[in-house]
Amino acid sequence: MTIKEYNIAVDTYADNIFRFVLKHLKDADASKDVVQDCFAKVWVKRDTIDAKKVKSYLFTTANNTLIDAVRKRKFTDDEASIDKHYSQAPLKNLDLQEILHNALDQLSDIQRTVILLRDYEGYDYSEIGEITNLKESQVKVYIFRARKKLKQILVSVEAVLES
Amino acid sequence: MEKINKHNYEAFYLDYLEGNLDEINQTMLFDFLEANLALKAELEDDILEFSLSPNTENLTTFEKEDLKYLNYLNDEICLDNVNDFIISDLENDISLEKKKELDAFLIEHKLEGDKKQFQATKLTPNLAEVYDDKAGLKKKGMVIPLVIRIVSVAAVGVLLFNFVGSTDSEYYTPRQSDFALQIDTLNHKFEINLADNNAVKTHKLKKSKIEKNDSTNYIEVKIDSIQPIIQDLPNQNNTIVIKQIILLDKDSSQVPIRIETPDFNDAIVQSTTPTEIDNGIKLVDMYQPIISLTNSYTNLDVSYKESTKESKYQVTSIKLGKFSFERKIRK
């Protein structure tokens, strides 16, 4: 890919990668680091990357980086996440999308990944499978589970709001 | 038969969930998970949300739904599987015919609200969340492909070559600033200007320092580390033609320097013919320093050679790696 194509990729996908990573890490600075890392890898391998496939390459790289980052965090963040759970904003002040985005935290990492790639980026099952190294049927199952879980959460929140 | 390992055990387990795993493979799967308790725990925590058991009677409701989800599309829509069809509709996985059937079913059973709830699970990105340092990620300048890089290096080499070899007048030589010789043929007086550490030194030679070597027909003049070898042409009154000038460094190893004809025209032309000048000048490796410098910077093989053909042009062929160039100047 040329420098022009690389710079277009920065303009086009930096925000998408950032949002995707931010939904996992919940830390803007750490997410920016991942974005920088992804684009640095693209720059290094620019001679071998087809400009048409750079988005997929970026998300694959971001996902792999996330897996490592999340694994490291799991050992240290347990207590912090409990505190965070109890310090969430009151439900009445949240709109539907905010509730939904908060509900993402209750999905497993892989469910969150596939649902974000599906809803944010509009990837189909096979593309998500390529990015996450899963079978198409596995992707389907994870999306299926994620939808049901998100619906359960929405229903329960609505019940709380109505009561 | 494919063996179960840590790279494919999830696929085996999904096949098991889908009811597509035969008894032998089921046994293998559970043996594998019992032998890899960490992976089993990971499945339990992250994927399955229930305890693994080879007995399908222990499957939770959630898992049964998974099993159904993967096989439901050919089923009749009923209250048990309607959520699966709603999700499939949301994911554009069902046919138009099935979609119409689903919509009719939802109206009939007053389940439109469920459809809306599933539709509400569609996430939309918050466009206010942006990466604010895109400029820092961007690259400036041109990405130069390898071929162009090599050509550029070659071009620089040629420029350098031509710069050193360029001429304001026809009688300028590349080494003139480093080394110039004026010969007073009548008085046997030599004046050599040397560039030593960028400072020009003038050495005036006394006649007594000129030694003639009859056997080689050379006159040797020694000045510090410089040893010009000057041929004394016989049968030419008061005529001296420069044959070769060799620079010697302190340990006396030879560093040849090329001297071009025009340098000495002023001194010689009065008493020699152009032919004699041409024949008398021996040219040696004047570009050696440039070649070494270019070679050390580019790590490419650098060489040059001059055409020996009779021509009004002096043609120098320069080879830089795989590329070759020609420098042509009028004599």
Image: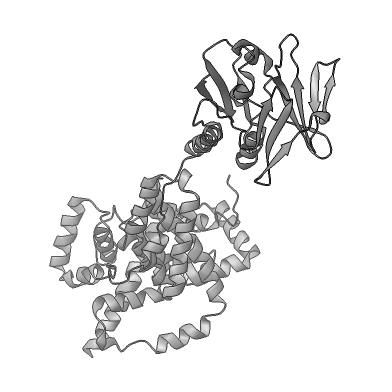
Q: On the picture, is B11 further left or further right than A141?
A: right
Name, please, the residue furthest toward the front: B187
Between B97 and A60, the one lying in front of the other is A60
Q: Quadrant of the N terminus of chain A?
A: top left
Between B51 and B285, the one lying in front of the other is B285
Between B133 and A69, the one lying in front of the other is B133
Identify the residue shown where x is 76% and y is 11%.
B234
* Quarter-of-image position of residue A120: bottom left
Identify the residue shown where x is 17% and y is 66%.
B106
Between B13 and B22, the one lying in front of the other is B13
Counting from the top left corner in percent of width and height, residue B194 is at: 68, 39
**Colour setup of the view:** one colour
Counting from the top left corner in percent of width and height, residue B97 is at: 18, 51
Identify the residue shown where x is 23% and y is 72%.
B117
| On screen, residue B283 above or below B91 | above
Q: On the picture, is B244 further left or further right than B115?
A: right
Q: Quadrant of the C terminus of chain A?
A: bottom left
Number of numbered discs present?
Answer: 0
| On screen, residue B186 above or below A2 | above
The answer to whether residue B45 is seen in the rendering is: yes
| On screen, residue B84 above or below A89 | above
Counting from the top left corner in percent of width and height, residue B169 is at: 50, 28
Q: On the picture, is A148 further left or further right than B4?
A: left
The answer to whether residue B61 is seen in the rendering is: no
Counting from the top left corner in percent of width and height, residue B172 is at: 55, 29
